[in-house]
């Protein structure tokens, strides 16, 4: 969703996409949207998943560096992902002539610093 959502021009378009995802999940996939994404709901008493909640949905294909199979999987443990990314970055920086300092972030307002200060 984020790939499309971030490129929409206004809040009405973003609300339309979210509503469409909710409708398609409920009707064509025969599953309850709020139940399916309940783990993303941020302290809503009614269990209703909002647009803002869905922004926490994240997938990657490198979450388990020991796995031979590289499938996109939902990231449910951001702290574990942070450790994997830091390890990969440390490994890269140890052999590269041009080390990188990178920051992983969910949005511009919430960031997780990955690189250690040098």
Image (cartoon, grey):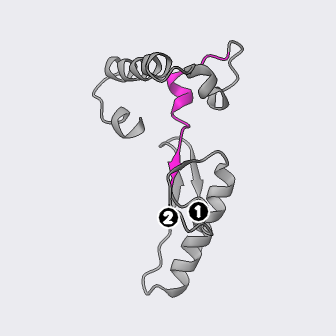
Question: Dot 1 corresponds to which residue?
Answer: 114
Q: Give the quarter of the figure containing the N terminus.
A: top left
Q: Is mark 2 on a helix, strand or loop?
A: loop
Q: In this view, does 98 lie to the left or right of 33?
A: left
Q: Circle 2: is it few (<14), some (14-19), or many (20+) Cα within 10 Å?
A: some
Residue at left 67%, top 31%? 39
Q: Circle 1: is it few (<14), some (14-19), or many (20+) Cα within 10 Å?
A: some
Can you give x and y, in whole percent of width and height, for residue 60 in the image? 51, 53
Q: Is-magenta flag for residue 9?
A: no
Q: Can residue 68 be seen in this view?
A: yes
Q: Is mark 1 on a helix, strand or loop?
A: loop
Q: 68 or 42, which lies in front?
A: 68
Q: Residue furthest left?
A: 9
State how far apart marks 1 and 2 are (Cα).
Answer: 6 Å
Above or below residue 99? Residue 34 is above
Residue at left 37%, top 40%? 3
Question: Dot 2 corresponds to which residue?
Answer: 102
- Image quadrant in which you'd find residue 68: bottom right
Q: 110 or 35, which lies in front?
A: 35
Q: 50 or 33, which lies in front?
A: 33
Q: Is residue 18 left or right of residue 39?
A: left
Can you give x and y, in whole percent of width and height, for residue 86 in the image? 60, 67
Q: Earlier in the sequence, mark 1 or mark 2?
A: 2
Q: Can residue 116 be seen in this view?
A: no
Q: Which mark is residue 78?
A: none
Residue at left 51%, top 78%? 92
Above or below residue 115? Residue 97 is below
Q: Give the range drawn in magenta.
A: 47-60
Can you give x and y, in whole percent of width and height, for residue 11 in the image? 36, 21
Q: Which residue lies furthest to the top in this view?
A: 46
């Amino acid at each position: 969703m984020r790939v499309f959502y971030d490129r929409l021009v206004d809040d009405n378009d973003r609300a339309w996409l979210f509503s469409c995802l909710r409708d398609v999940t409920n009707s064509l996939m025969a599953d309850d949207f709020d139940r399916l994404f309940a783990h993303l709901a941020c302290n809503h008493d009614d269990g209703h998943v909002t647009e803002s909640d869905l922004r926490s949905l994240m997938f990657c294909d490198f979450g388990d560096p020991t796995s031979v199979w590289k499938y996109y999987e939902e990231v449910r443990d951001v702290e574990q992902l942070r450790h994997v990314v830091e390890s990969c970055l440390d490994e890269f920086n140890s052999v590269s002539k041009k080390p990188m300092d990178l920051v992983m972030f969910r949005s511009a307002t919430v960031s997780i610093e990955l690189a250690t200060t040098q």
